[in-house]
Image (spheres, rainbow, N blue to C red):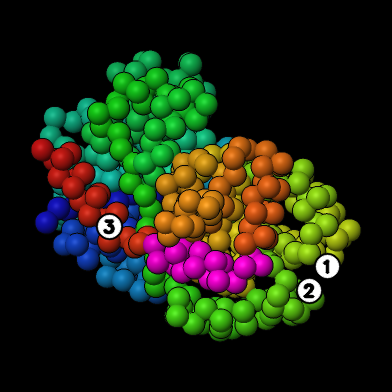
Amino acid sequence: MNKVLYISSEAYPLIKTGGLADVAGSLPIALQKNAQDVRLLLPAYPEVLRNINKSKIRTVSSYYSQPVNIIETRLPGSKVIVWLVDCPAAFNRPGGPYTDGHGQIWDDNAFRFAIFCHAAVDIALNKLQLDWQPDVVHCNDWQTGLVPALLHLQPQRPATIFTIHNMAYQGIFDQQTFFDLHLPVELWHMDGLEFHNQLSFIKGGLAYADKITTVSPHYATEILSPEFGYGLDGLLRSRIKNLSGIINGIDDKHWNPGTDEHLKQKYNRRSLDKKLLNKTDLQQELTLAVDASIPMIGMVSRLVEQKGLDIILLALSSLLTHPIQLVILGTGETHYELQLAEWAQNYPDHLKIIIGYNESLAHRIEAASDMYLMPSTFEPCGLNQLYSLRYGNLPIVTHVGGLADTVTDANQENIANGTANGFVLEEQSAAALLASIEQALVLYQQPKIWRQLQINAMSGDFSWQTSAERYIELYQQALE
Ligand code: ADP
């Protein structure tokens, strides 16, 4: 049994802004089921403190003259122990984990997550009297990047794993911040935390972790190229022997159409006809024409460039002439929100935009839709295409990252050999997007083929079990 300290800046259901939370809320549980002794370390944001029911204060420390408690609780619905880094100066404020209520990035994020990392390092070295020392420290994304760097300087330390969930977010700050944080000077160089004269948190993970993973095999190869590497492809190429891709699983307890409490009508592979009731229910709710035969295309997403919003907007004028209902739930960059809202106003019968974050509606859109739109410019793993497959809602995707690893195009050959489960764009363009949607609409009119595609999609194995086994193998390698 390994003792694993799993460090994340968010974890569902305590606090979530995106896919990282889904992973951090389910992988530790899967690891525990596979005989790993896991502790999850999270910042104690107000929302987290509101979401826990029982807790006790374990230990008290201080970093940068700020008092820090470690609060112990459990991940709701599981036996996984959660330690919360409770530093009021860093985390007790209204707003999100990374931004204020207006979406503005907190200007002291370096300080906030440096505190988080220092606490993690002290726990890793058993300096906080928690009577538990990890064999493996598993870090996630830039917010945890200082941990492998600081541990690297220790003669006796646990093995370190750094998982990249998204290379686009790197935690870059000016050089003065490096000095203000009193980080060890031996970490300031080109092969360390320095990135073009700036401080890069993510480089702490990429340069110093014993093993680096990312969340799909395809993305693991893409980030070695300048196009997807954001200036860090060279460093990653130098670490290629220690870099691998492990696809995310999905949390079967929350994302299962057979048991999903959010749905009007539960269904599974054998009762797919019942799925339609979810569509007519949503049509009613959104004041769309109530007709089960109208193809519904769903999308639940952060509204940012990464998610392919530009080609979607370019395709809308042609797309909305088709007899479809397009339903988009999301929040993000204001210009996308405004443009989509305007299109929805002009095409009320064909397009519904719901601006906001709504977990229940996200589930209902997955169950109601026939197709799912995810033409991302890059996608480290992507969870929504996995949820869509699980819900028999065929994804329309670009051939990037985890989308390329999980979606197989419904061309003649793949339909014949039984592997087709969605639609893959030939390139990242509005024309290719339209072509794929039109291909989907043609097949939608052939119920026997469509049903087979849905069954192929729903039969995929996206359980956490397989991925958890891969991580445990990797922990073993890192320890050796
Ligand atoms: P990313 O992490 O890049 O945002 P993923 O597809 O990996 O994309 O994961 C996104 C997660 O966030 C999914 O669980 C998705 O359902 C959820 N999500 C995104 N936007 C919303 C929203 N507006 N309302 C509810 N859930 C959302």
Identify residue for label 1. 349
The residues colored magenta run 444-460
Secondary element under disc 2, as helix, strand or loop, is: loop
Identify residue for label 3. 466
Q: Residue 60 appears at what percent x and percent y?
A: 30, 53
Please give left or right for residue 372 compared with residue 430 in the image: left
Main SS class of the magenta portion in the image = helix
**Local crowd at mark 2 within 10 Å, few (<14), some, or many (≥20)?**
some
Is 246 or 420 nearer to us in this picture? 420
User: Can residue 341 be seen from the camera position used here?
Assistant: no
User: Can residue 461 be seen from the camera position used here?
Assistant: yes
Q: Which mark is residue 288?
A: 2
Please give left or right for residue 7 compared with residue 143 in the image: left
Residue at image point 83% right, 57% down: 321
Q: Quadrant of residue 361?
A: bottom right
- Residue type, numbered disc 3: Thr
Quadrant of the image for the N terminus? bottom left
Sequence order check, earlier mark of 3 and 1 = 1
Judge whether 262 appears above or below 207 on screen.
below
Sequence order check, earlier mark of 2 and 3 = 2
Q: Is residue 456 magenta?
A: yes
- Residue type, numbered disc 1: Asp
**Local crowd at mark 1 within 10 Å, few (<14), some, or many (≥20)?**
some
**Local crowd at mark 3 within 10 Å, few (<14), some, or many (≥20)?**
some
Please give left or right for residue 172 compared with residue 242 in the image: right
Residue at image point 70% right, 63% down: 327
Q: Residue 320 appears at what percent x and percent y?
A: 80, 57
| Total number of numbered discs in the rendering | 3
